[in-house]
Amino acid sequence: MSLACIVSIIVLVAVLLIGAPIPFAFMGAILSIVIIGGYDYSFLVPYGYTQAGSILLIAIPMFILAGAIMEKSGIGEAIVNFADLFVGRIKGGLCIVMTVACALFGSVSGSGLATLSCIGSIMLPRMYAAGYPRGVSSALISSASLLGLLIPPSMNMILFAFVGGQSVLACFLATILPGIILIIFLSLTSLFILRKDTNIQLPQRIEKGQRGKHIAKTVWASVPAMLAPVIILGGIYAGIMTPTEAAAVAVLYSIPVGWFVYKGLNRTSLKEGFIYAGKTAGSVLTMLFCVMMLSRLYVMEQLPRAIIDGLFSISDNPAVLVIFVNLFLIIIGMLMDDTSAILLTTPIMLPVATALGINPIHYAAIMAINLGLGCVTPPTAPFLYFGSRVGGAPINEMLKPTMYYIFMAWIPTLIITTYIPRLALFLPTMFGYV
């Protein structure tokens, strides 16, 4: 590994640790390589601009906007009420409701942060009123909101597919079964944590004569919300829409449904949604512009080859080397947000993964779980801190249940996904993408 490459990595990590904006860290790393390595920088800006100009990337602001609209429209509450019909009366059932609701909302918004703020604001007051501990509830929403990384359509899988040159639909399919496994593990872990809690109150039983009417009313009210993932995902997998077109359909569908059906959307909230989507998309595309230039320099400096050689100098056992890849991705997920981590690591680590015999589509699922795990792993844990703010729970109350979720849900899901490749590749193979 060259001196320029080593200095750039040191600069990147140092700038991240002092809390500077991530694009500044990328630009600092770029400048250090250009100056020390003596590169002609004139090719970098055109290259970054060309990469950031792909029509596929239009899907990103569209999904961000759809998530912002759904967050304010009442669609999230309809999804929660639908999930509550099935498990609401089980002790700890509201934890399952919140987990499933996060998965359903993530399947139409594609954003973990939108899922956390929307489902968290709906579910956490209900859970506190029913006697659920604040620490457990806030820790769960921090983890469950990251199901948006796994349940398609995921904005981050679109970025991975774009940067890694893979099929977007194949990446979507690869994360579905791991996502379902994580839903099950998160739910079972919640029931285990709360098994001896005597403060939890079950909702009042609905009288027999009213039960049918209640179910029918709830299902009818949730139909417009539940149609959103059917239309979006069905259109994508049936080949009727591209992911970019599906993102636009998600926006066009959510506006009238939120405005006229659930009546949670108005002119002010719609304007706020557009502003939020514009700011977030601008931030993502700025990071993409910077990281594409940085990854180009790293490839020219043969950083992936240096990592491969370093790993094989430690061991020639692929099962052992994959552990190091997982640890690296978890650490990256702890240092930066999931979007930045995908943009930075994909060009560097995808060649490493393929050299270890990992299918690129399988690697997409491994990476998504690792980065989600990093986002809730202390000490950095960005989603843990955001969940603390949304839930009003002190971090120290969230740490113990978070450790339960990490060791009983996230890590088992990661191990299963990593060492049973057919789990991630089953659906892509069935649809002919592998």
Image (tube, rainbow, N blue to C red):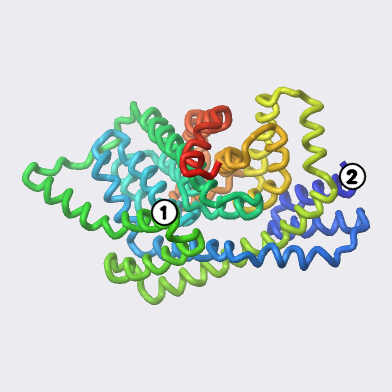
Instruction: Please report the residue visible at 62 percent of the width from the left and 41 percent of the height from the top.
Output: 360
Side of 292 where 182 appears, left or right? left
Q: Which residue is mark 2?
A: 2
- Is the C terminus in the top left, top right, bottom left or bottom right quadrant? top right
Q: Residues within 10 Å of mark 2 (few under 14, many from 20)?
A: few
Q: In terms of image quadrants, where is residue 292?
A: bottom right
The residue at which mark 1 appears reads as 238
* Vertical order, 305 against 262 (above or below): above
Identify which residue, 29 or 365, lies in the foreground: 365
| Displayed quadrant of residue 365 | top right
Where residue 271 appears, as percent x and y from the top left, is 45, 74
Q: Amino acid at mark 1?
A: Ala
Percent across and percent down for residue 105 are: 40, 52
In the shown orientation, is residue 412 left or right of residue 191? Answer: right
Which mark is first along the chain, 2 or 1?
A: 2
Residue depicted at x 69% and y 37%: 354
On the question of residue 308 being in view, the answer is yes
**Amino acid found under the numbered disc labelled 2:** Ser
* Relative depth, front residue between 118 and 233: 233
Residue name at image x 25 percent, y 41 percent: 86
Residue 245 image point, x, y percent:
47, 64
Note whether 176 is above or below 106 in the view shown: above
Q: Residue furthest left?
A: 209
Where residue 421 sits in the image (x, y, percent)?
Answer: 55, 31
Residue 106 shows which numbered tag? none
Q: For this view, does 26 lie left or right of residue 57?
A: right
Residue at image position (32%, 41%) is 94
CA gap, disc 1 and disc 2:
48 Å
